[in-house]
Image (tube, rainbow, N blue to C red):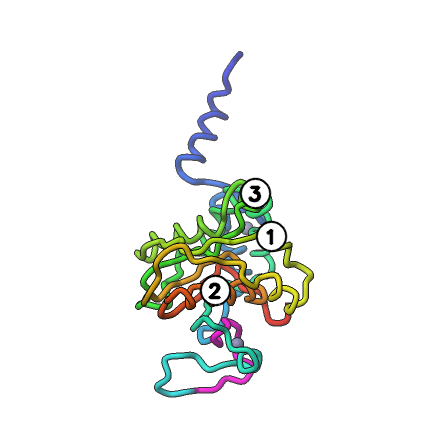
């Protein structure tokens, strides 16, 4: 059988030099081209503790903690701060869905492009802890995207990776559920399996929606003795979604 050397060469070149067409518009070069990257909305620099923009910004001098928004005043999160790289919306939603549902490695590369300029917002953080999916969901999907994301950030931010949490039981799909139902599902969902006493841990996940999982996971780490828990996600849904 004749081998198409030219085509083969092209495939190897692409794999070797990490070349791919833009996932969103097809322009050759990178997994996410510059014009498409420009469509992605960033989050404000000084969000509330929950990671969302302040509706009425309050300036507090001399306070290391950000001021609270109305939602957080009613129900303060157990974590100290939450930050995300980008707002969850077009085109990031397409990328993340593609990555999660199909384990698409080009989509992962595009997501990683979004991480490159991210700096660790908490210089005193001791270790990064992935927010784990239940093994059954991980097994069905074939990979754990939050573990992979955390490993990548641990290298970038030069902090140890500490997989301190385990899901005790699968949580039903949270989409479409009311916040109170989500909270009910998440009660006792996590278990701390590593010593975390005195540590400032950064919980890492791909998307933060209502923050119920992050709250439950942070509470579990604090109960196990962590000094402080911060949350970092690749994307954050806007308020009210
Ligand atoms: Zn593009
Ligand atoms: Zn808030």
Marked residue nearer the N-terminal end (1 or 2): 2
Circle on res. 73: none
Nearer mark to the viewer, of 1 and 2: 2
Residue 84 is tagged as 2
Disc 2 secondary structure class: strand
Marked residue nearer the N-terminal end (2 or 3): 2
Query: Foreground: 42 or 202?
Result: 202
Picture residue at 43% right of the left edge, 79% below the top: 66
> Where, by quadrant of the figure, is residue 228 drawn?
bottom left
Percent position (x, y) of residue 181?
66, 65
Ligand 1 under 8 Å from disc 1 Cβ: no
Does residue 117 appear to the left or right of 139 in the view shown?
A: left
Tell me if mark 1 has few (under 14), some (14-19) or many (20+) residues whose alpha carbon lies within 10 angstroms of its own: some
Counting every numbered tag in the picture gives: 3
Is residue 54 visible in the rendered image? The answer is: yes
The residue pinned by badge 3 equals 141
Q: Between marks 2 and 3, how big is the CA–CA gap?
A: 24 Å
Kind of element beneath mark 1: helix
- Nearest to N terminus: mark 1 or mark 3: 1
In the rendered image, which residue does mark 1 sit on?
Answer: 94
Give the residues drawn in magenta, as a range: 47-59
């Amino acid at each position: 059988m004749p081998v198409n050397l030219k085509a083969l060469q092209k495939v190897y070149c692409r794999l070797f030099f990490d070349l791919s067409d833009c996932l969103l518009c097809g322009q050759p070069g990178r997994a996410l081209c510059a014009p498409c990257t420009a469509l992605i909305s960033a989050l404000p620099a000084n969000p509330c503790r929950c990671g969302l923009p302040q509706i009425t910004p309050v300036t507090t001098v001399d306070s290391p903690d950000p001021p609270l928004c109305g939602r957080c005043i009613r129900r303060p999160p157990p974590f100290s701060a939450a930050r995300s790289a980008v707002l969850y919306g077009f085109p990031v939603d397409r990328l993340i869905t593609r990555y999660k549902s199909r384990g698409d490695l080009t989509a992962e590369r595009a997501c990683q492009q979004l991480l490159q300029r991210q700096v660790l917002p908490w210089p005193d953080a001791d270790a990064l802890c992935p927010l784990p999916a239940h093994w059954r969901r991980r097994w069905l999907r074939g990979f754990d995207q939050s573990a992979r994301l955390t490993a990548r950030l641990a290298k970038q931010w030069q902090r140890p990776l500490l997989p301190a949490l385990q899901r005790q039981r699968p949580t039903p799909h949270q989409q479409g559920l009311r916040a109170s139902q989500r909270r009910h599902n998440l009660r006792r969902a996590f278990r701390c399996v590593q010593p975390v006493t005195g540590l400032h841990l950064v919980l890492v996940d791909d998307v933060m929606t209502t923050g119920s999982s992050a709250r439950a996971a942070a509470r579990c780490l604090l109960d196990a003795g962590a000094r402080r828990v911060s949350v970092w996600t690749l994307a954050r849904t806007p308020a009210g979604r």
